[in-house]
């Protein structure tokens, strides 16, 4: 029976998947993919796409970004500058436009999508998810998904009122930010003023809006990597647990243990959100778990930093899955290899000549390292690489990943 089902499924995939032919880089009919944002996540997707012979163009706000180092061409522009973004798209005329960061003039993406360009996953998804207000209202008010209580504020007076309404403790985040930038937890009255200042100083964009949300003493949080294929079929990776410091990823592991009942709830929430956003590609859906309750937190319409563990934990990493989904190629199976972990390599300082000694980092079996190749550190903490490991248990894998990270010597 299983064999018959497999044959039927294979025939079904052959019928519904008919990806466009892939052209040769630099040729007249090259398949061109433009990345708006060329950090470490974009770099891995570019590498995955180049294995299919795709021509990659990397765009970022600074030169020599990680993705630029492996792309065919690159451009340095401010992506919130609508004219600059419009001009570079017109110059390159890519087959696919792939936003990899939040700070983009998304109205330009909507404009080009209407002209027939393919934006991954969609221009609407990029526009909604760049702003916490847009995506939270869709989740809670349109879709009725469970979330924490929240209020948005556009001025310090509205912010103070929102904190009073939500109550202490609460969490404050800029409406647009990433990697925990501008995020703080307000526990006592004296934290309120500082929370507003941090959100304003470290948030991205110019909106000045913040979200004040209820602080949940959750049991754990997960990232559910969710793949939406061109035909609308949804696939899920095993849940990823993670550790954060000030809202920024430091460790992740897969599979995070959870009951089948709770996992089904998580899948339902992720599928509902991803289907609402539409299009094709990988989505990182962040969820809070408290007992049997699952709360929607955020969604990224692209590979997620906590998903870097999939570079060692799966037959197809989240980056390889994104590449296949972008091109409309079949994904026959996602195989998880067992307890796996990642640990971010973070360094603070100032240097344009960063060096790494990794000789003692790879002594243990089933370990690996990715160095991102970021061109400089400019004072604040910066993620420079990731250590990867597989183990006999989650704790074993986490310990090995941290040992690998700690064995790397960084010289500035």
Image (cartoon, grey):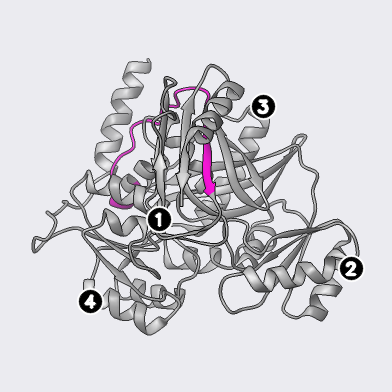
- In the rendered image, which quarter contains the N terminus? top left
Q: Is residue 278 magenta?
A: no
Going from N to C along the chain, the mark reached first, 4 or 3, is 4
Task: Using the image, tell me which numbered label, if any, was put on residue 164.
Answer: 2
Query: Viewer-proximal residue, 124 or 130?
Result: 130
Task: Please tell me whether mark 3 or mark 2 is closer to you in this view.
Answer: 2
Helix, strand or loop status at disc 2: helix
Circle 4 is placed at which residue position? 91
Mark 4–mark 1 contact, CB under 8 Å? Answer: no
Query: Viewer-proximal residue, 228 or 95?
Result: 95
Q: Provide residue 372's location: percent of width, then percent of height.
A: 39, 49
Compute the Cα span from label 4 to label 1.
26 Å
Corner quadrant of residue 264: top right
372 relative to 255, above or below: below
Helix, strand or loop status at disc 1: loop
Circle 1 is placed at which residue position? 374
Going from N to C along the chain, the mark reached first, 4 or 1, is 4
> Magenta segment range?
325-346
Corner quadrant of residue 187: bottom right
Helix, strand or loop status at disc 4: helix
Circle 3 is placed at which residue position? 259
Mark 4: few/some/many CA within 10 Å (<14, 14-19, 20+): few
Q: From the viewer's perspective, is 181 left or right of 75?
A: right
């Amino acid at each position: 029976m299983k064999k018959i089902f497999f044959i039927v499924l294979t025939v079904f995939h052959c019928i519904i998947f008919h990806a466009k032919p892939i052209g040769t880089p630099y040729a007249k009919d090259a398949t061109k993919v433009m990345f708006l944002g060329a950090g470490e996540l974009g770099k891995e997707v570019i590498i995955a796409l180049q294995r299919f012979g795709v021509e990659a163009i990397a765009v970022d706000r600074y030169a020599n970004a990680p993705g630029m180092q492996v792309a065919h061409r690159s451009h340095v522009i401010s992506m919130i500058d609508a004219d600059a973004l419009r001009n570079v798209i017109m110059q390159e005329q890519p087959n696919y436009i792939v936003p990899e960061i939040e700070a983009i003039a998304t109205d330009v993406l909507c404009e080009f999508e209407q002209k027939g360009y393919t934006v991954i996953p969609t221009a609407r998804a990029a526009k909604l998810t760049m702003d916490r207000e847009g995506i939270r209202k869709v989740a809670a008010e349109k879709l009725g998904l469970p979330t924490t209580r929240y209020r948005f504020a556009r001025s310090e007076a509205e912010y103070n009122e929102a904190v009073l309404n939500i109550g202490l403790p609460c969490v404050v985040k800029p409406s647009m930010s990433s990697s925990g930038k501008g995020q703080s937890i307000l526990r006592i009255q004296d934290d309120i003023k500082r929370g507003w200042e941090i959100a304003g100083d470290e948030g991205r964009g110019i909106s000045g809006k913040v979200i004040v949300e209820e602080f949940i003493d959750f049991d754990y949080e997960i990232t559910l990597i969710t793949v939406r294929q061109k035909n609308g079929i949804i696939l899920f990776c095993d849940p990823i647990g993670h550790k954060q410091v000030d809202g920024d990823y430091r460790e992740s592991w897969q599979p995070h243990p959870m009951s089948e009942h709770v996992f089904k709830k998580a899948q339902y929430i992720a599928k509902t959100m991803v289907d609402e956003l539409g299009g094709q590609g990988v989505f990182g859906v962040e969820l809070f778990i408290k007992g049997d309750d699952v709360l929607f937190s955020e969604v990224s319409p692209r590979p997620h930093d906590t998903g870097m563990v999939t570079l060692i934990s799966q037959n197809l990493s989240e980056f390889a899955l994104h590449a296949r989904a972008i091109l409309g190629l079949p994904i026959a199976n996602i195989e998880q290899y067992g307890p796996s972990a990642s640990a971010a390599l973070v360094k603070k300082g100032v240097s344009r000549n960063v060096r790494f000694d990794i000789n003692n980092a790879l002594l243990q079996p089933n370990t690996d390292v990715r160095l991102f190749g970021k061109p400089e550190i400019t004072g604040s903490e910066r993620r420079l690489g990731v250590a990867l490991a597989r183990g006999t248990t989650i704790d074993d894998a986490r310990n090995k990943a941290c040992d690998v990270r700690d064995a790397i010597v960084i010289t500035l």
